[in-house]
Image (cartoon, rainbow, N blue to C red):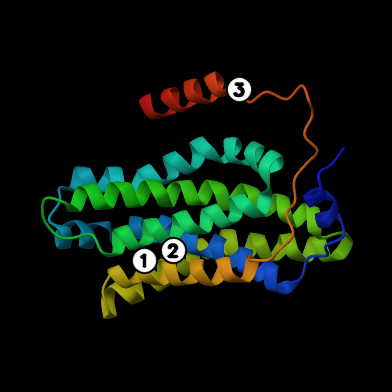
Amino acid sequence: MQSSQVSEGARFVGNDRVLFGIIFGVLAFWLFAQTTLNISPVMANDLGIETSVMNIAVSITALFSGIFIVVVGSLADRFGRVKMVQIGFGLSIGGSLLVGFAPSGSLASAFLMIGRILQGLSGAFIMSASLALLKAYWTGAARQRAISLWSIGSWGGSGFAALFGGLMAENVGWRWIFFAAAAISLLGMLMVSGTPESKTETKAAYRFDTLGVLTFMVMMVSL
């Protein structure tokens, strides 16, 4: 039998407030995923870290996002997609603030790496669970519109982030890119807040493959 949360979600019809809240989360991901690639020399110089460390910080977000996106998608189906999206927003805010407030000197690498890992995890949570929400709460032409707007925020966000990041770094400083990402994530979190939960019916025979996930993670990090 489905839980009450599933039944409640079945009666909910997606609206623009929730849709654009989700899109803000997707857009925030690109603000720190794509922009960091473009401004990494400026960040490395300001923070006083080596180029090799900065290169790892740039790529580690995509690594953690790629590792966990399938895992989080499975967890979202079982424990709730809205919950996973909101966790993603929280990770985005925390990671963005860590990078934005990273001090120059010996602690810079720690702030930067932890922040970038949290940002990568946020992408895994938001991207997988939000797309599942669109399929659950929008139907017909409304679903096509919602997915189209989500795709614009995802793929178009890459180009927007490059332009926005360059303007911010040139005029007010690179840190404000991450403060903006945190603010957009907070706004998205508030807009999605209150959305009925959506998840699939749990089957008695279901067992999470913990060993398989850990093996996959070790393999990806090693590569």
Relative side of 209 to 50, left or right: right
Disc 1 marks a residue whose amino acid type is: Phe
Q: Nearer the viewer, residue 85 or 40?
A: 85
Task: Report the residue at 38% width, 56% height from top.
Answer: 95
Of circles 2 and 3, which is in front? 3
Dot placed on the residue nearer the N-terminal end, 1 or 3: 1
> Pointer 2: what residue?
31
Quarter of the rendering containing residue 140 = bottom right
Q: Are marks 2 and 1 in contact (CB under 8 Å)?
A: yes
> Pointer 1: what residue?
178
> Pointer 3: what residue?
209
Locate residue 33, reporting x and y percent: 42, 55
Disc 2 marks a residue whose amino acid type is: Leu
Q: Are marks 1 and 3 in contact (CB under 8 Å)?
A: no
Q: Residues within 10 Å of mark 3 (few under 14, many from 20)?
A: few
Location of the C terminus by quadrant is top left
Disc 3 marks a residue whose amino acid type is: Asp
Location of the N terminus by quadrant is top right
Task: Report the residue at 19% width, 56% height from top.
Answer: 44
Relative side of 178 to 194, left or right: left
